[in-house]
């Protein structure tokens, strides 16, 4: 029964073709591609703006235009005033969110019944774009800095509370039993077991909160139109100066990147692991 | 093709196989298998043992076509129906998102068989490996031993002439493992009784006892870069049951193989400047 | 010097004898927390320190805080007169278009970014910069380009939500297991079969997470756009009533937004559960 069949050579069905690129390229492929991708984007943008002619640059700023606008802007004392205002709003707002969010999150996570009581409200506010509360904040606090700080902290607050409570709830039961078996007091168990286990969750909350806080700054400043980087953007729009407007937007981008980098440092400092990113909302 | 004396009844023939891995970053070549010759007859149960990292997994992947050799040639007998070979992977190799029946019939579906027909053909195999009634469960609902049964059924389902098994029982506890060994022999004979030709098996393990118990031949590989050191015929009567492990002949085989591997381990230890002992 | 022998104490769980059992604790306390706050709110805004000037000298100023009953009354008014419907439909429209575009565009971009390594590397700086930008800051620019009609709002909604989809989808593709790919190719799966049997099953849970996040962010986009440039929509309704000290109606808008957010979130979660049959359930 075997006579008719014959032997055939095995051929790989998953042959992976490796690139024939030179060695120096392969070693730095990631950075080379990233850099050239960005460079290509900027160059094409600049060329497109140049080709379209002057009248069109009202709408499509160009890289060189943005740099020019930035050069003018940084010489103005008003600009630094705006930057300081925005920075202060973000800082103070995040501080308030952290100062309130962490204790409340801990309480909600630790006391089961408190958690149950807060549940409907947390769900509601989590599903609600918090930024929609802005008109109320204006009613209560006026158009000044307090209102904007409140807007930032409201944006960031829930992103801190929810992961913090989550972190407390998921503390390893075995660890708690170890603590209890050693007759540690509630307070001791809390500070020695619950708090350290929750820190990574708090930090991943901070990561999300930063984004929310920034949105708070932007929208509050758009809304109040008194001071801050957001006002630079709105005023530039009214003056049809899209270069300056994009400069303002890029300032927000840079702060977003810097802050998220700072959070990564925090993360590395406190924990090697990070809970899944499904925590948001 | 060099016409060796008995190519007639060979299922697999490897000649001068050399395998080099290429490091992606440094482009350095890393020799995993030096030069390997191996012939396996049809219906034979052959086990490869050898120190960790000697290239056993690499070899079965070469046979399976997941990798291609840098040098040399691997020949397998072409088959009229079914596949020439199929692989039983190590633990947790089922697709967690498929029910057992879909996992088992996966190879058939890949070969273009309709889902309905594939399910029909998978059922007898699910029963053969003792999983009747579990076909609509997801892998997480099965124990480790049951998952490996499904894994085996998936390979058997494409009706391979050669069954490639890379440490299939490594993740199981000692008792389940013994049960699975006896089961494997039962299934091996059972598949034959179903009317097909006896399957050729290429099995890989670290457990010498397992190798002796299962095999017609045990092939001992040297430490990396892998070569074949010894090819030992196991002349224990079949069908075997677990009692055979208590016989003196069995223990002699075990001792012989252990000596071979121990010499390799010592060589490796001194290679790393082992001043211990 | 005699030491009193310590008393033997029971070490069983103390909880059991402290309290009568409440059948569904979770629901009980949830209702308690919900109703409790409403009652306190109502009471606080009806309690006048100086009865001659109702609503001005209370625990809270009624004109600034409103009260649950006032909100209810205003709600009944606006719904029965139909005044609120145009706002709802226009917001829904903006949300829907933006969300759908975000999902389709985001999933396809995320899949290609995850699958093609070079494409991902080349676009990485741009994508992560945009991801860190509060994209709603682009609204003034969008208005310059696309005007203040439906288009500019849909664009903002897309910008606000698409990155959640892109990034999650991309991470999903990247978490495809090498081992599963190897198994598929061992059984001779074609490219399409690999995508169908390995890549998609791994990625779908990630995609759905992205979609769920995007649903919420799209709502943010709608509100911000309507705050900035609109004469209709729930966001506009909130802003207008805030400016005219019509606090009850501000709360109506908030209830609508929150209710819609919960509804959509649960909807996506239903889909998620449907795709999660193969996972051991931890939470239930
Ligand atoms: N994809 C790869 N790229 C580079 N080197 C590899 C790769 N796979 C395996 N190797 C190397 O090749 C050698 C042989 O690996 P292989 O997996 O075949 O060993 P093994 O005999 O199966 O070992 P074990 O018994 O531990 O499973 C090892 O030294 C390993 O480091
Ligand atoms: Mg191996």
Image (tube, coloured by chain):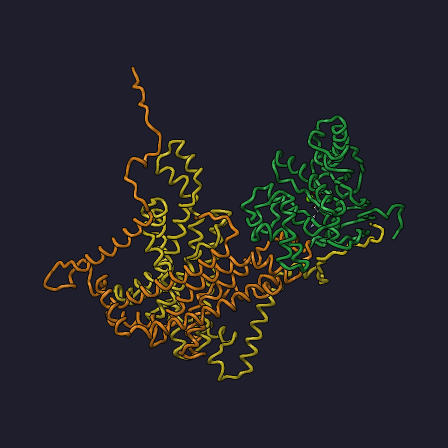
Chain colours: A yellow, B green, C orange
Percent from the top left, x then y, of residue B35? Answer: 81, 46
Residue A74 seen in the figure: no
Task: Tell me what residue is drawn at x 83 percent, y 48 percent.
Answer: B15
Where, quadrant-wise, is the C terminus of chain A in this rendering? bottom left
Asked whether C260 or C157 is in front, the reply is C260
User: In this figure, what is the number of numbered marks?
Assistant: 0
Percent from the top left, x then y, of residue B25? Answer: 68, 55
Is C28 on the left-hand or right-hand side of C106? left
Is C140 on the left-hand or right-hand side of B50? left
Is A168 on the left-hand or right-hand side of B157? left
- Does C181 sit above or below residue B165? below
Residue B251 seen in the figure: yes
**Residue A8 figure quarter:** bottom right
Is C235 on the left-hand or right-hand side of A248? left
Point out the residue furthest to the top here: C1
Percent from the top left, x then y, of residue C1? Answer: 29, 15
- Does A165 sit above or below residue A13? above
Task: Tell me what residue is drawn at x 62 percent, y 42 percent.
Answer: B130
Percent from the top left, x then y, of residue A119? Answer: 34, 52
- Does C27 sit above or below residue C214? above
Asked whether C60 or B218 is in front, the reply is B218
Asked whether C17 or B107 is in front, the reply is B107
């Amino acid at each position: 029964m075997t006579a008719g069949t014959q032997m055939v050579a095995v051929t790989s069905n998953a042959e992976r073709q490796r690139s024939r690129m030179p060695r120096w390229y392969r070693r730095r492929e990631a950075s080379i591609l990233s850099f050239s991708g960005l460079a290509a984007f900027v160059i094409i943008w600049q060329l497109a703006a140049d080709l379209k002619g002057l009248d069109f640059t009202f709408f499509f700023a160009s890289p060189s235009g943005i740099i020019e606008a930035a050069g003018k802007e940084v010489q103005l004392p008003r600009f630094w005033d705006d930057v300081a205002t925005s920075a202060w709003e973000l800082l103070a707002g995040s501080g308030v969110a952290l100062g309130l969010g962490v204790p409340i999150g801990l309480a909600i996570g630790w006391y089961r019944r408190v958690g149950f009581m807060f549940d409907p409200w947390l769900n509601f506010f989590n599903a609600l774009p918090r930024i929609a509360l802005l008109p109320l904040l204006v009613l209560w606090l006026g158009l000044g800095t307090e209102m904007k700080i409140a807007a930032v902290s409201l944006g960031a607050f829930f992103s801190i509370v929810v992961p913090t409570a989550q972190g407390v709830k998921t503390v390893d039961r075995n660890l708690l039993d170890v603590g209890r078996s050693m007759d540690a007091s509630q307070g001791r168990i809390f500070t020695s077991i619950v708090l350290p286990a929750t820190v990574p969750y708090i930090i991943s909350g901070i990561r999300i909160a930063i984004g929310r806080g920034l949105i708070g700054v932007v929208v509050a400043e758009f809304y109040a139109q008194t001071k801050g980087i957001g006002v630079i953007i709105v005023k530039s729009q009214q003056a049809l100066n899209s270069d300056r407007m994009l400069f303002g937007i890029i300032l927000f981008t840079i702060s977003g990147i810097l802050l998220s980098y700072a959070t990564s440092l925090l993360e590395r400092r406190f924990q090697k692991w990070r809970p899944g990113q499904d925590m948001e909302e | 093709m060099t016409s060796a004396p008995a190519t007639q009844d060979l299922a697999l023939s490897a000649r001068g196989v050399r395998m080099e891995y290429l490091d992606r970053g440094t482009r350095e070549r890393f020799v995993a298998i030096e030069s390997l010759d191996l012939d396996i007859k049809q219906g034979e149960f052959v086990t490869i043992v050898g120190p960790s990292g000697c290239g056993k997994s690499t070899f079965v992947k070469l046979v399976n076509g997941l990798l291609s050799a840098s040098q040399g040639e691997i020949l397998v007998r072409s088959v009229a129906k079914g596949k020439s070979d199929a692989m039983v992977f190590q633990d947790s190799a089922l697709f967690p998102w498929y029910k057992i029946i879909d996992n088992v019939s996966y190879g058939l579906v890949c070969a273009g068989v309709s889902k309905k027909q594939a399910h029909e053909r998978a059922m007898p195999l699910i029963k053969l490996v003792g999983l009747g009634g579990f076909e609509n469960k997801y892998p997480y609902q099965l124990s480790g031993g049951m998952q490996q049964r499904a894994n085996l059924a998936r390979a058997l389902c494409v009706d391979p002439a050669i069954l490639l098994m890379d440490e299939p029982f490594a993740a199981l506890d000692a008792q389940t493992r013994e049960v699975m060994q006896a089961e494997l022999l039962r299934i091996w004979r059972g598949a034959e009784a179903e009317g097909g030709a006896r399957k050729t098996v290429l099995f890989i393990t670290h457990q010498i006892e397992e190798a002796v118990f299962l095999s017609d031949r045990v092939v001992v590989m040297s430490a990396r870069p892998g070569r074949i050191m010894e090819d030992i015929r196991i002349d224990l009567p079949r069908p075997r049951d677990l009692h055979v492990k208590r016989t003196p002949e069995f223990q002699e085989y075990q001792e012989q193989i252990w000596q071979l591997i121990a010499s390799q381990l010592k060589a490796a230890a001194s290679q790393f400047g082992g001043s211990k002992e | 010097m005699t030491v009193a022998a310590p008393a033997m104490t029971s070490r069983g769980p103390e909880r059991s004898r402290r309290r009568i059992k409440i059948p569904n604790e979770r629901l009980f306390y949830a209702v308690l927390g919900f109703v409790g706050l409403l009652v306190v709110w109502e009471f606080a805004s009806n309690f006048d320190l100086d009865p001659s000037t109702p609503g001005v000298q209370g625990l809270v100023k009624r004109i600034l805080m409103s009260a649950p009953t006032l909100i209810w009354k205003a709600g009944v008014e606006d719904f029965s007169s139909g005044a609120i419907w145009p706002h709802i439909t226009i917001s829904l429209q903006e949300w829907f278009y933006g969300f759908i575009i975000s999902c389709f565009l985001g999933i396809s971009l995320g899949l290609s970014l995850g699958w093609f390594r070079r494409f991902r590397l080349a676009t990485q700086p741009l994508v992560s910069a945009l991801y860190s930008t509060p994209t709603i800051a682009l609204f003034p620019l969008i208005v310059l380009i696309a005007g203040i009609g439906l288009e500019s709002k849909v664009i903002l909604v897309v910008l606000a939500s698409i990155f959640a989809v892109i990034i999650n989808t991309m991470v999903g593709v990247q978490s495809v297991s090498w081992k599963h790919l190897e198994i598929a190719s061992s059984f001779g799966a074609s490219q399409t079969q690999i995508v169908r049997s390995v890549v998609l099953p791994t990625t779908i849970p990630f995609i759905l997470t992205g979609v769920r996040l995007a649903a919420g962010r799209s709502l943010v986009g709608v509100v911000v756009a309507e705050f900035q440039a609109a004469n209709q929509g729930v966001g506009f309704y909130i802003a207008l009533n805030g400016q005219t000290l019509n606090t009850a109606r501000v709360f109506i808008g908030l209830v609508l937004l929150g209710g819609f957010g919960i509804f959509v979130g649960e909807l996506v979660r239903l889909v998620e559960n449907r795709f999660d049959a193969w996972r051991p359930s931890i939470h239930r």
